[in-house]
């Protein structure tokens, strides 16, 4: 999700009534579950392809660049 889309979603949440807020909350939770599942599948594929260690090293390098 783009940063601007995130801001718009949160602003819509602020303005929403109770029922709409609840719908938006459940939508966000569904997205969280979806992405957790996708990440778990990606991790399993990386392990199968013996890429998990390499990906870990690459993430550590990216983290160093951000810090």
Image (spheres, grey):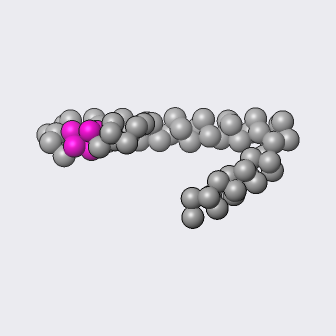
x and y percentages locating residue 14 in the rendered image:
19, 46
State which region is magenta. Answer: 8-12
Residue found at x 37% / y 42%: 3
Q: Is residue 33 magenta?
A: no
x and y percentages locating residue 11 in the rendered image:
22, 43
Residue found at x 81% / y 42%: 51
x and y percentages locating residue 54 in the rendered image:
80, 48
Number of numbered labels in the structure image: 0
Residue found at x 77% / y 39%: 46
Magenta span: chief secondary structure: helix
Question: Toward the viewer: 66 or 42?
Answer: 66
Residue 29: quarter of image: top left
Report if residue 22 is visible in the image.
no
x and y percentages locating residue 50 in the rendered image:
85, 41
Q: Is residue 14 left or right of residue 57?
A: left
Q: Is residue 11 left or right of residue 34?
A: left
Q: Is residue 10 magenta?
A: yes
Residue found at x 76% / y 54%: 57
Residue 64: quarter of image: bottom right
Report if residue 37 is visible in the image.
yes
Q: Is residue 12 left or right of residue 55?
A: left
Compared to residue 57, the image places residue 46 above or below, namely above
């Amino acid at each position: 999700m783009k940063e601007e889309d995130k801001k718009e979603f949160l602003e819509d949440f602020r303005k929403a009534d109770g029922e709409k807020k609840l719908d938006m909350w459940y939508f966000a939770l569904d997205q969280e579950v979806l992405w957790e599942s996708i990440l778990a599948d990606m991790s399993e594929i990386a392990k199968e392809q013996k890429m998990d260690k390499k990906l870990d090293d690459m993430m550590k390098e990216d983290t160093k660049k951000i810090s």
